[in-house]
Image: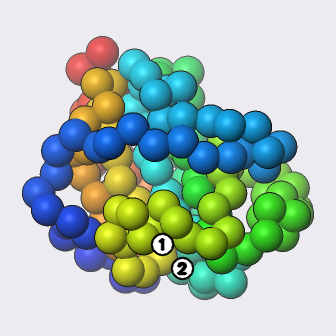
Amino acid sequence: MLLTEFPATATPGPVIEFEGKDLADSTVKISDYAGQVVLVNFWATWCSPCKEEMPVLQEYYEDHQDAGFTVVAINTGDSPEEAAAFVEKYRYTFPVWSDPPGNRLIALGIRGLPYSLVLDQQGKRVAQWYGATNTEHLESIITPLLEQQ
């Protein structure tokens, strides 16, 4: 497992609002999750570390969604149909967006997958990393934010 915590861009801070399409082709925005702690995760079906961490994200999501936490998994490099088939096969229940051409990756200066960033309840970027995560890592970053509510 590779877990490298360092900024993909400058120092952590506010994230510019962005929108995308979910797997049902509906327009969605990060601000739709205002007031929640949000883990934004960029992934692809062909990315082994991405596939390794997805069950970890699902478990953490299930355990903490009632406490004001969500995952927004943004698939890149796959068609919406490929992403939907993957999500259905493994029964992931967190929100999944589709960005097949990788426009969001380019706009944020992301150079590898998986890439995750955490937004606090005010939408401020408080953490970011490249590489697959684990439960202990999520607990150390996200749980304290949830306890502040």
Q: Viewer-proximal residue, 32 or 134?
A: 32
User: Local crowd at mark 2 within 10 Å, few (<14), some, or many (≥20)?
Assistant: some
Q: Residue at x 61, y 82 (%)?
A: 47
Residue drawn 17% across and 44% down? 13
The amino acid on which the numbered mark 1 sits, given as a three-letter code, is: Pro
- Element class at badge 1: loop
Q: Which residue is mark 1?
A: 114
Instruction: Say which residue label 2 marks.
Output: 49
Q: Look at the numbered discs 1 and 2 and tell me whether their residues touch, using CB distance below 8 Å.
A: yes
Q: Quadrant of the N terminus?
A: bottom left
Q: In this image, 84 relative to 124: left or right?
A: right
User: What is the quadrant of the C terminus in the image?
Assistant: top left
Q: SS of the residue at dot 2?
A: helix
Residue kind at label 2, given as amino acid type: Pro
Q: Residue at x 58, y 53 (%)?
A: 73
Label 1, label 2: how far apart the Cα atoms are: 7 Å
Q: Is residue 114 left or right of residue 80?
A: left
The residue drawn where x is 80% and y is 62% is 80
- Given this view, does label 1 or label 2 mark the residue nearer the observer? 1
Question: Percent from the top left, x then y, of residue 147?
Answer: 29, 23
